[in-house]
Image (tube, rainbow, N blue to C red):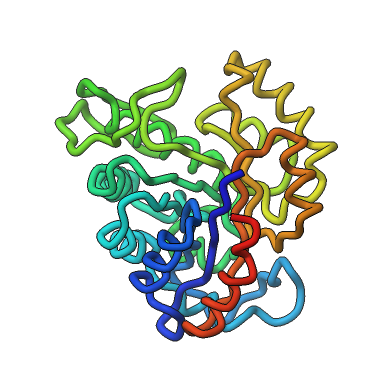
Amino acid sequence: MRIAVTIFLTDETITPVRLARELEARGFAGLYLPEHTHIPVERTTPYPAGGDLPREYGRTLDPFVGLGQAAAVTERLGLGTGITLVAQHDPIGLAKQVATLDHLSGGRFTLGVGFGWNVEEAADHGVAWRTRRELTQDRMALMRALWADEPTAYEGEFGSVRASSAYPKPVQKPRGPLAGPRTLVGGAAGPKLFAHVAAYADGWMPIGGRGLTESLPVLRGVWADAGRDPAALQVVPYAVFPSAGKLAHYAELGVEEVVVQLPPAGEAEVLGALDAYAEYV
């Protein structure tokens, strides 16, 4: 089983360069970074985990800049977002960022896609909350048109692009209905989420990894109904606090990669956590 990590990298934590080098030297499979452009101070949206919103949410580094630094100092380490708030991006610009990072890293990038939880953050980007999922699906389709091997136009409900010359292309070749890098959709189990996974992703990134025994058969049914190859489905539990028993359970379910949570801290604390997780690598 591959063990990757995620961390809220901020202006107060270990740097992307130091962390990436340590991860690759220790045999970890990948580094996934979250995204928040800003956190409005005046907000009514509660923190999903309850209580006060942790300090690091308003201080996160841009994931693409951080992962670009990580790519430059490593050769094998996987690089991913956990997750990219696609609805909050211009899709033409995001398609270029994704393809460039994947190209420069030699195909090591995984695009984690999410829908967000902070209504006020999304509103500042002009996102209507009720249609953010549909907007995300539309923008993913537009990006796939830009990633296609041949110039491909796209006309959607929320945006369009002319048939264009758009390079570089992501390294991974088109597969089934997909073009672009490995793509995982994050979020809680449910019909809407699973429909998105089957429509435009390589798999699911369940936060925390709870309830997989019950939810995986449902996802596999939705996946099969969409005509997707059963063997191609990837499930990557995300932000997990690991134990030997938990990882063994995931392995029994066919999980091949797990993303474990690191503290949003300085070098000493983060490297100590890596030492603690080393037994699982």
Residue 257: where, in percent of width, then height?
59, 44
Q: Quadrant of residue 49?
A: bottom right
Answer left or right for 242 relative to 231.
right
Name the residue nearer the viewer: 277 or 165: 277
Q: Quadrant of residue 65?
A: bottom left
Q: Quadrant of the C terminus?
A: bottom right
Q: Residue at x 19, y 38 (%)?
A: 168
Above or below 256: residue 18: below
Q: Residue at x 78, y 41 (%)?
A: 212
Name the residue nearer the viewer: 47 or 59: 59
Residue 38: where, in percent of width, then height?
46, 73
Q: Residue at x 56, y 24 (%)?
A: 232
Q: Quadrant of the N terminus?
A: top right
Q: Quadrant of residue 142?
A: top left
Q: Residue at x 47, y 82 (%)?
A: 267
Answer left or right for 176 relative to 118.
left
Residue 80: where, in percent of width, then height?
44, 52
Above or below 268: residue 100: above
Answer left or right for 221 relative to 152.
right
Above or below 266: residue 253: above
